[in-house]
Image (cartoon, rainbow, N blue to C red):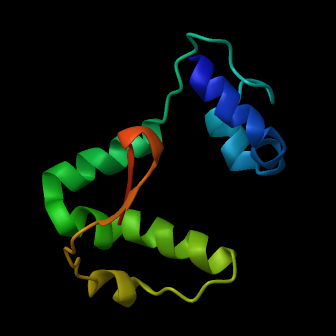
Amino acid sequence: DAVYRQRAGWRLAALRDDAESARLFLAAGELPAEGHRLRQPELAETLERLAAHGHDGFYRGEVAEKLVEGVRAAGGIWTREDLAGYRTVEREPLRFALADGRELIGA
């Protein structure tokens, strides 16, 4: 939609500079036309694994291996053991009042 095109346009150079971002979010290196459907089959597979297997569908197995590979390829130090031992901690969100009665909420 117009909002996507505007916001992606703000970061168009960065999207073009990263091959994976360009593959996912651009159409032949350009902003897609309004009405273009962005498809992310890999994300769909990840969400299906998470739905079917819960914590282990994300933090163990194939998804975890791909995450670790990506982080390590970028210079990070994650291990499969780091992910396997990860536990979420629920906290109250951070809230900041904005103009016009709006609110910014973050993790």
Judging depth in this view, the residue of 3 and 49 nearest the camera is: 3
Q: Residue 42's x, y, as percent?
A: 45, 43
Which residue is painted at 20% across and 68% down in the image? 55
In which image quadrant can residue 34 be found? top right
Which residue is painted at 59% across and 69% down in the image? 70
Which residue is painted at 30% across and 72% down in the image? 59
Q: Residue furthest front?
A: 100
Side of 69 where 75 appears, left or right? right
Side of 106 where 93 appears, left or right? left
Q: Residue 74's x, y, as percent?
A: 69, 75
- Quadrant that contains the N terminus: top right
Q: Is residue 61 above or below residue 30?
A: below
Judging depth in this view, the residue of 48 and 11 nearest the camera is: 11
Q: Is residue 17 above or below residue 32?
A: below
Q: Residue 9's x, y, as percent?
A: 75, 32
Judging depth in this view, the residue of 39 and 61 nearest the camera is: 39
Q: Is residue 86 above or below residue 21?
A: below
Q: How many marks?
A: 0
In which image quadrant can residue 44 be found? top left
Q: Is residue 18 above or below residue 82?
A: above
In which image quadrant can residue 35 be found? top right
Which residue is painted at 21% across and 70% down in the image? 92
Q: Residue 85's x, y, as percent?
A: 27, 88
- Quadrant that contains the C terminus: bottom left
Side of 90 where 76 appears, left or right? right
